[in-house]
Amino acid sequence: MRILSVLFSFIIILWAEPSVFEGQQKTIESQKEFYKNIAPSDENTDYENNRYEDYVAHSSLALTSEEYPQNFYVGEAFNIELYAKTLEDVKFDFNLSLVKNDSLHFLNPKNSFEKISNDTYKNTLWFEAKDANANLEQIVVSMLRNGKVFQKASLQIQPLRFQYPPKEQTYAHIVASSLDVGQVKTSYFDEKNIIMMLELNATNANLKSFFVNGVQKQGIENYKGDFNASKAFYYAIFPASKNHFEFSYFNKESKKLENFNIKLQISNDEISTQSDLNPTNKDFNIYKQYALWALAFVLAILFIFKRNYFILGFALLSFALSFLVDTNTHNGLLKTNTRVKILPTEPSTYFYTTNAEEEVEILGKRENYIKVLFKNGKIGWVNDTDLLKN
């Protein structure tokens, strides 16, 4: 009976097996038929050579400008209002170039176009002539998409003429509609020199050009604003014997030089690099300590002979005060290639760089800046990370 059951099962399996293979074959055939009916793709499968195609402009680019004067002074900051008009509605970038000579400085090359309407963009270009030979012939604007130029236009500039303003020995090379002096700070820079900080406020001027002949070390710090209205601090280092600073600028509205005479008076304001500093203070404190010890000794001798307890009290007081005198100096070691600033501010000018590790006296601290005294008597500010740890 068992033999008959096994034989019957074997027959059933043999009968069912072809139907399985037949079902699989039907599935494969139906899949082939399905893929035959799919339309071929138009996608570029050559990925190695699949690049952005060159964009074709659908409109023209037109450049115009506001009316501008043709006569300027050397050293005067002037502008040209440039407009670019295009109907392109895709993403693109502007690139601006100039046809000019080296005597004309382009003051704001990083200024970008601003969209002011659906089809118009504006850019204010500022210039300054360094001599009377300055020349600007053309302004060229290109439109780029995917880094490639697809449209370009140029604007021919009417001839510009430049003349020198009247000069004198104290001329600061500034042409402005107005210039005012705000705060004035003067303090010791080192044993032989003083430093002056002058707050300047100007309209229609480039304060970065402020420069007076004959000043050995000078510069502009903390510039704020734009060429329409700006503020900055001018610093200059003079011999300690100098007590006045004179300069002039050319007022283009009144067409004449205006003069300033600044009194150099030492101040103790905290912004100064050398405020209330004297490199010999520590040595002087040592002498004060010696004097208090000597006084205590003399009073002690008098007490022995006079037996007066008031004298003893003064002797003890003098002896105690001698230990309250600060005779310690705090020294540090600067790293090699440390750059030393004039002021404890980020944009301040560097006036010295160490060539090797250099020992300094630490005079004070302001935020992350350390005020240091060098062995040659110069004082400046360094970043606290420039000090080697003990």
Image (cartoon, grey):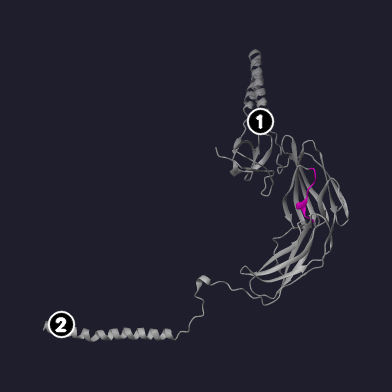
Residue 222 pos. (x, y %): 71, 51
Q: Nearer the viewer, residue 329 or 121?
A: 121
Please say whether residue 318 is one of the residues in the magenta stretch.
Answer: no
The boundaries of the magenta stretch are: 205-214
Q: Quadrant of residue 195?
A: top right
Q: Residue at x 71, y 75 (%)?
A: 60
Q: Which mark is residue 6?
A: 2
Crowding near the residue tagged with mark 2, few <14, some 14–19, many ≥20 C-alpha atoms within 10 Å: few
Q: Which one is closest to the eye, mark 1 or mark 2? A: 2
| SS for dot 2 | helix
Q: Quadrant of the C terminus?
A: top right
Using the image, determine if residue 26 lies above or below residue 109: below
Residue linked to disc 1: 282
Q: Amino acid at mark 2?
A: Val
Residue 304 pos. (x, y %): 63, 14
Using the image, determine if residue 102 lies above or below residue 302: below
Q: Amino acid at mark 1?
A: Lys
Q: Quadrant of residue 30?
A: bottom left
